[in-house]
Image: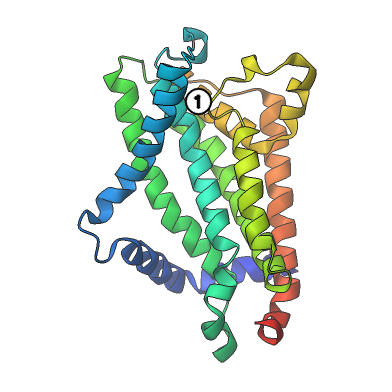
């Protein structure tokens, strides 16, 4: 029942979602000299820092078995989906409170705020994705025809996972204001608990099995396999990723729909 209401709300307010998405993109760069170029500069800056630290200073090397011997390209392939997830979740957690005046004064479909934020960050993701493809070609790595198709298979559960967590954390943050700070701490820990800056092969075998339960590991490993190898990740990991992502999506929208009526009394 609740999931039907959620989908109906998203479809009915699709033009409002579009306007919020465009507004968010404009507000990020209004008054900025470089404007939309910051979309490119930001991830490339992070990539440069991590590449210098881990590739140059710590002498980390990867082999062709990972699809490329270029550490920066390999790192960027894992960094892109993480940035989409982390930035959307981080901003979505406080989005209901940020739009308190709008929610208190009108009958507003507040669940669409998270969708517009996700789509806004998805625009940045696809810009970064084009840069990644260019990086693969420039470094001489082969780009397989099925790479783009396979990558979509991993982007879809990433979107469901991100939106589900965004609704869940946003709803709970209205009643427990410390959650916003807690999410920031958890994201920092989650980053290093995910195979973004290191391959899974360097993880001690005694704890490597626990990494299977981290859904973002499957997203990142799957994206790398898709782009750099033209292949899918493990079938078990992909199945778990879809089950977990759909589960979080359903739970997130359910909690949000159940609690949204109480937002006005609290904010």
**Along the viewing direction, whichever of 127 and 267 lies nearer the viewer:** 267
Residue 245 location (% of width, % of height): 68, 46
Residue 78 location (% of width, % of height): 50, 31
Above or below, 78 against 243 in this view is above
Q: Which residue sits furthest top?
A: 64
Q: Quadrant of residue 256?
A: bottom right
**What's the image's color scheme?**
rainbow
Residue in view at x 56 percent, y 62 percent: 92
Within-10-Å neighbours for mark 1: few <14, some 14–19, many 20+: many
Give the residue at mark 1: 224
Q: Which residue sits furthest front?
A: 57
Q: Is residue 159 visible?
A: yes
Above or below, 153 against 166 in this view is above
Locate the N terminus by quadrant.
Answer: bottom right
Residue 77 location (% of width, % of height): 45, 30
Above or below, 34 against 105 in this view is above
Residue in view at x 56 percent, y 36 percent: 154
Residue in view at x 55 percent, y 68 percent: 95
**Along the viewing direction, whichever of 170 and 235 lies nearer the viewer:** 170
**Along the viewing direction, whichever of 58 and 69 lies nearer the viewer:** 58
SS at mark 1 in the image: helix
Residue in view at x 40 percent, y 17 percent: 56
Locate the C terminus by quadrant.
Answer: bottom right
**Marker count (numbered):** 1
Q: Which residue sits furthest right?
A: 206
């Amino acid at each position: 029942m609740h999931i039907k209401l959620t989908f109906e709300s998203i479809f009915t307010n699709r033009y409002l979602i579009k306007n919020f998405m465009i507004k968010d993109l404009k507000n990020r760069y209004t008054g900025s000299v470089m404007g939309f170029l910051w979309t490119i500069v930001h991830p490339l800056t992070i990539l440069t820092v991590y590449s210098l630290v881990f590739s140059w200073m710590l002498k980390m090397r990867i082999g062709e078995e990972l699809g490329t011997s270029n550490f920066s390209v390999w790192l960027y392939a894992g960094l892109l989906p993480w940035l989409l997830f982390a930035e959307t979740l981080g901003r979505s957690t406080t989005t209901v409170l940020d739009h308190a005046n709008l929610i208190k004064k009108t009958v507003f479909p507040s669940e669409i705020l998270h969708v517009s934020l996700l789509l806004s960050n998805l625009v940045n993701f696809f810009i970064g994705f084009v840069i990644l493809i260019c990086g693969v070609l420039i470094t001489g790595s082969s780009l397989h025809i099925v790479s783009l198709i396979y990558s979509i298979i991993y982007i879809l559960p990433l979107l469901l996972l991100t939106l589900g967590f965004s609704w869940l954390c946003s709803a709970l943050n209205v009643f427990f204001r410390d959650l916003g700070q807690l999410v920031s701490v958890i994201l920092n820990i989650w980053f290093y608990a995910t195979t973004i800056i290191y391959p899974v092969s360097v993880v001690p075998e005694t704890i490597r099995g626990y990494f299977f339960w981290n859904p973002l590991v499957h997203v990142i490993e799957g994206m790398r396999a898709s782009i750099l190898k033209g292949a899918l990740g493990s079938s078990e990991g992909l199945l778990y990723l879809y089950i977990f992502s759909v589960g979080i999506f359903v739970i997130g929208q359910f909690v949000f729909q159940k609690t949204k009526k109480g937002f006005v009394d609290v904010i």
